[in-house]
Image (cartoon, rainbow, N blue to C red):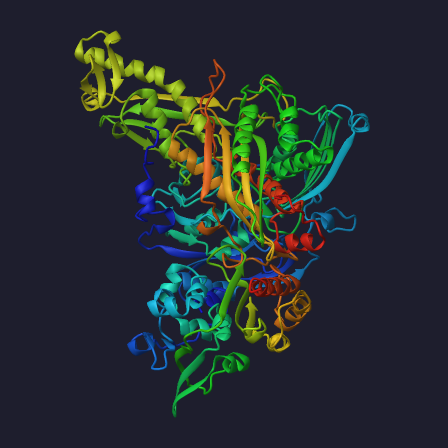
């Protein structure tokens, strides 16, 4: 029953769906953005004269043409819309052109004369933190520091019988959404602006654009669905300001659609981090002390860099109960692109380190890695990672035991090693907070109406980015109201038509849709039934909403159309906040999901290449709303994480991208995906839990890398501490003689 | 060419389509039993052709590692060879294939080895017409391509080998090829000479590893170093030889 085909499924699979970048309008112009030639430079002069003279060019804009705030950024608007005197990465915008064709726009960019004085390039956090480093921002090179301390770490270490220390390095990952940034911005006759551009938060874009354009928010309409993927990458503004400025300058619709190379150059990426962890246990295998230092390369501008570091700090001890914890993190400005929002939000980086520590510690004290986890894993009623009260479930232990069972079964059926191949199996567990966290504005809301045409309209400010929010809304609404999907009209992704629901991020969509329905349905059903009582004269107690309308005695007594005909619409709205911990700990989460991952690998001893031959995820996130959607998120997340583990890395040298396109930046293809891809959804919640289904948009990506890394160790005895795992490192490790026969 | 254009290299202002010359898109058995493959045969046809599958399965295997099905349906075997670093080249070198060219003064034929070594067509306006592989193939063939992912990926290392043993288990004839990345695939002639007449003892194989690394002359880049590429080429060729023992 829950294996429903998603409402937007067929159109997407057949390619019939029109994305926003497919739109065209009469009189439409094409725009292109001139990005910086240098990763760090002073702009000495800027002349657009020649570009303006090129026939077909309708407008050329620079920093002088930004009417209000020349900056954007979800929290701190420190990124110039158009740079005036300094460029800080090769994606920094210097000018933008609108022309009659995309070719003319491209030619015009070549005619813009910019003279730069190159400045020293800060291409690593180490360089940025050096005393002599040039300051990239007035406040210095440190974007954010975060930390957490519990207990006396030194005393705790002194009581440890074994301590393991390792530094883990994780790469810059690209979201690699199918549809690059783009859309059309239309100046309307009444002076308002309609922005047809994909985003994860239409109302936030409206706010940011209003601040840039000096226009009231109400005069800007954001239409943002459907879009061809995001994964966090379109959460921040991208090309919207240029389209908007050019549309206003020319009075004509303006289309921008970045090429893959333009996208690679300007888009945000996952934070590369260097994480040093020192972890100690007592003779019984109890974790006593855990010290973590995180250095994140946040690139040139802030976006959500601080929150991502906070998230990593929060999850540094994951689902384990550790007596003494000392976590320190710093997020550092560099001239390496911009790091920002990405599915997993700092959790993937820190979990790779933490779960690497668990396997190393287990080996060091000679106990089974599974047993070590079981000894230390949180139980129901234990406080959250920052000591805060959280919504209690037994998810951590449940995913561990589920993964343990899978691990045992798979281990018994392990394929035999061949002459030049070794096989291995590994596991990892994690917990992952949903919502934005304590102390952050995290409003949600929705609206339910019976329209004049008899449709039950359900409206949210969420965006459909491929994640399947439409299917979730359909499933939750039909289940909670009792109507059919045909009775529904789902409205999302248009600020003119929907209420604010907050951002489509942080695994919050599913959860917030469910919570909204809980708040909306009582009043809505009551008003619908009251009208049915009026119209039929029946007792309310015998009436209920069912497929097609209001039912009585097992039959549809009155259709929604008849109920609505000639009447005012029934409208019920709700506004509330994402639930947070009663404990006022900054950025702490309240709702968590849990995951246990088992990975199997095959290592080629001749080439050092790793093939993942099996990936099993056990996920505890409350009831499954839509099985296909849930599976899609976990499996898709798993494959994305497999790429992160084995091949994905936006390589930069001296602030320039070495990977400029999909010929060198690799994402997994179907041949890289294990045939043995499985999922166990653990749906149980404690009695009385009233938080319903949790979102699973991120959890499937979080603990895959460490499970694969642990499986590589099992196969050949090589400890992975740097992602992506390079075949070269594997070969070198074997030349050093770490290869051992584990499968005799 | 499309990929090169994406990478910003200039595209010729005019292109002439040869697609209409159907005669160049055939695979046939010649009178002496060899296989002649028209240069315009698309890779997918070539890969699935009964003659290729039956008489030269290693070529079919090699072609299946080139690009993706969609590209193989459009790309031709001739295009792959003229690209200079195509993945069909190593196996064709190992099989000692011959190339035929249509020149101003008629058809000219040459060893693939000579073409690849010199990297230029026999005449300026020559058109590659077909590739001939001698058949039946008496010895054993080996091919392996290693990329940065499982499929649809340029090669990091591609190796191919042909070898024939005597009754006394010594090497009678051998052709070893290594290529990958931007390195032109090349025959490892010195290694081959070292092996002729030898038995594949541990000592022989041990000394061969360094020779392969040296002679393969593979070039590194930011994704895979010189050392890695040469080591992998040696590992693969040695493992293949070992399996013969």
Q: Position of residue A177 (x, y in %)?
A: 46, 47
Q: Residue at x 71, y 52 (%)?
A: A737
Residue A332 location, quadrant: top right
Q: Position of residue A24 (x, y in %)?
A: 33, 52
One can see residue A232 in this view:
no
- Considering depth in this image, is A736 or A657 the residue closer to the camera? A736
- Considering depth in this image, is B42 or A689 the residue closer to the camera? B42
Q: Position of residue A172 (x, y in %)?
A: 59, 48
Q: Position of residue A272 (x, y in %)?
A: 63, 45
- Considering depth in this image, is A424 or A234 the residue closer to the camera? A424
Residue A148 location, quadrant: top right
Task: Report the side of A439 relative to A103 (left or right).
Answer: right
The image quadrant where one finds the N terminus of chain A is top left
Residue A657 location, quadrant: bottom right
Task: Report the side of A155 relative to A475 (left or right).
Answer: right
The image quadrant where one finds the C terminus of chain A is top right
Task: Report the side of A153 relative to A19 (left or right).
Answer: right
């Amino acid at each position: 029953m829950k294996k429903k085909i998603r409402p937007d499924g067929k159109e997407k699979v057949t390619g019939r769906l029109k994305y926003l970048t497919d739109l065209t309008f009469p009189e439409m112009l094409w725009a292109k953005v001139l990005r910086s030639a240098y990763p760090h430079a002073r702009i000495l002069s800027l002349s657009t004269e020649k570009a303006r003279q090129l026939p077909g060019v309708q407008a050329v804009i620079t920093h002088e043409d930004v009417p209000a705030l020349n900056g954007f950024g979800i929290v701190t608007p420190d990124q110039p819309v158009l740079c005036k005197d300094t460029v800080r990465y090769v994606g920094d915008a210097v000018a933008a052109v609108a022309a009659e064709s995309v070719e003319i726009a491209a030619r015009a960019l070549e005619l813009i004369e910019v003279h730069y004085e190159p400045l020293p390039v800060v291409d690593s956090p180490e360089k940025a933190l050096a005393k002599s480093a040039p300051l990239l921002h007035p406040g210095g090179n440190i974007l954010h520091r975060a930390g957490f301390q519990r207990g006396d770490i030194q005393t705790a270490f002194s009581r440890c019988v074994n301590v393991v220390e390792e530094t883990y390095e994780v790469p810059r990952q690209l979201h690699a959404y199918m549809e690059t940034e783009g859309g059309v911005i239309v100046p309307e006759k009444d002076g308002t602006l309609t922005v047809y551009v994909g985003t994860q938060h239409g109302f936030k874009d409206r706010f940011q654009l209003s601040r840039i354009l000096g226009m009231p928010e109400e005069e800007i309409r954001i239409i943002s669905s459907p879009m061809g993927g995001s994964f966090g990458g379109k959460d921040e503004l991208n090309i919207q300001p240029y389209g908007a400025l050019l549309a206003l300058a020319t009075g004509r619709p303006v289309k921008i659609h970045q090429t893959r190379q333009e996208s690679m150059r300007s888009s945000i990426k996952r934070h590369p981090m260097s994480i040093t962890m020192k972890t100690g246990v007592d003779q019984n295998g109890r974790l006593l002390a855990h010290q973590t230092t995180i250095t994140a390369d946040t690139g040139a501008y802030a976006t959500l860099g601080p929150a991502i570091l906070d998230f990593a700090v929060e999850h540094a001890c994951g689902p384990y109960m550790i007596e003494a914890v000392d976590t320190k993190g710093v997020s550092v400005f560099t001239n390496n692109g911009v790091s920002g929002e990405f599915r997993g939000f700092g959790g993937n980086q820190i979990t790779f380190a933490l779960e690497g520590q668990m396997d190393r510690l287990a080996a060091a004290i000679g106990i089974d890695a599974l047993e070590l986890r079981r000894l230390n894993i949180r139980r129901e009623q234990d406080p959250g990672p920052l000591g805060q009260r959280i919504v209690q479930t037994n998810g951590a232990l449940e995913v561990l035991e589920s993964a343990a069972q899978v691990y045992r079964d798979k281990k018994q059926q392990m394929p035999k090693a061949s002459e030049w191949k070794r096989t291995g199996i590994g596991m990892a567990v994690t917990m992952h907070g949903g919502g934005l966290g304590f102390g952050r504005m995290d409003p949600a809301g929705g609206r339910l109406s019976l329209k004049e045409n008899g449709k039950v309209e359900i409206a949210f400010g969420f965006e459909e980015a491929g994640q399947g929010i439409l299917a979730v809304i359909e499933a939750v609404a039909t289940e909670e109201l009792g109507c059919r999907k045909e009775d529904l009209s789902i409205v999302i992704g248009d600020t003119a038509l929907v209420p604010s629901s907050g951002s489509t991020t942080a695994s919050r969509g599913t959860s917030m849709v469910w919570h909204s329905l809980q708040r909306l349905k009582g009043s809505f059903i009551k008003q619908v039934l009251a009208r049915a009582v009026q119209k039929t004269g029946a007792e309310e107690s015998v009436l209920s909403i069912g497929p097609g309308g209001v039912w009585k005695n097992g039959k549809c007594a009155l259709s929604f159309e008849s109920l609505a005909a000639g009447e005012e619409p029934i409208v019920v709205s709700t506004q509330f906040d994402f639930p947070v911990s009663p404990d006022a700990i900054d950025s702490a989460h309240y709702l968590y999901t849990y995951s246990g991952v088992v990975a199997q690998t095959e290592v080629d001893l001749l080439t050092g290449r790793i093939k993942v031959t099996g990936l099993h995820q056990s996920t505890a996130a409350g009831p499954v709303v839509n099985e296909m959607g849930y599976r899609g998120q976990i499996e898709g997340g798993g494959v994305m994480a497999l790429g992160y583990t084995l091949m994905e890395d936006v390589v930069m040298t001296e602030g320039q991208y070495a990977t400029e396109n999909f010929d060198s930046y690799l994402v997994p293809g179907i041949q890289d995906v294990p045939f043995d891809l499985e999922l166990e959804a653990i749906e149980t919640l404690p009695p009385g839990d009233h938080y319903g289904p949790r979102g699973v948009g991120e959890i499937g990506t979080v603990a895959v890398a460490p499970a694969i890394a642990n499986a590589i160790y099992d196969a050949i005895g090589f400890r992975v501490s740097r992602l992506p795992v390079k075949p070269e490192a594997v070969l070198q490790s074997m030349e050093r003689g770490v290869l051992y026969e584990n499968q005799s | 060419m499309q990929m090169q254009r994406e990478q910003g290299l200039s595209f010729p202002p005019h292109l002439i389509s040869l697609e209409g010359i159907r005669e160049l898109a055939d695979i046939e058995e010649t009178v002496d039993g060899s296989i002649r493959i028209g240069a315009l045969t698309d890779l997918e046809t070539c890969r699935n052709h009964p003659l290729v599958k039956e008489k030269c399965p290693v070529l079919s295997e090699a072609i299946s590692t080139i690009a993706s099905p969609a590209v193989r349906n459009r790309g031709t075997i001739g295009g792959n060879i003229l690209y200079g670093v195509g993945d069909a080249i190593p196996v064709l070198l190992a099989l000692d294939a011959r190339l035929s060219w249509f020149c101003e003064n008629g058809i000219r034929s040459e060893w693939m080895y000579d073409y690849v070594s010199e990297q230029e067509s026999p005449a300026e306006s020559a058109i590659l017409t077909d590739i001939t592989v001698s058949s039946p193939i008496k010895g054993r063939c080996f091919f392996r391509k290693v990329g940065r992912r499982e499929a649809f990926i340029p090669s990091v290392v591609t190796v191919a080998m042909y070898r024939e043993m005597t009754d006394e288990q010594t090497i009678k004839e051998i052709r070893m090829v290594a290529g990958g990345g931007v390195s032109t695939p090349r025959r490892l002639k010195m290694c081959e000479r070292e092996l002729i007449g030898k038995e594949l003892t541990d000592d022989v194989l041990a000394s061969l590893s360094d020779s392969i690394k040296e002679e393969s002359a593979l070039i590194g880049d930011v994704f895979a170093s010189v050392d890695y590429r040469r080591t992998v080429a040696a590992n693969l060729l040695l493992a293949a030889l070992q399996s013969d023992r």
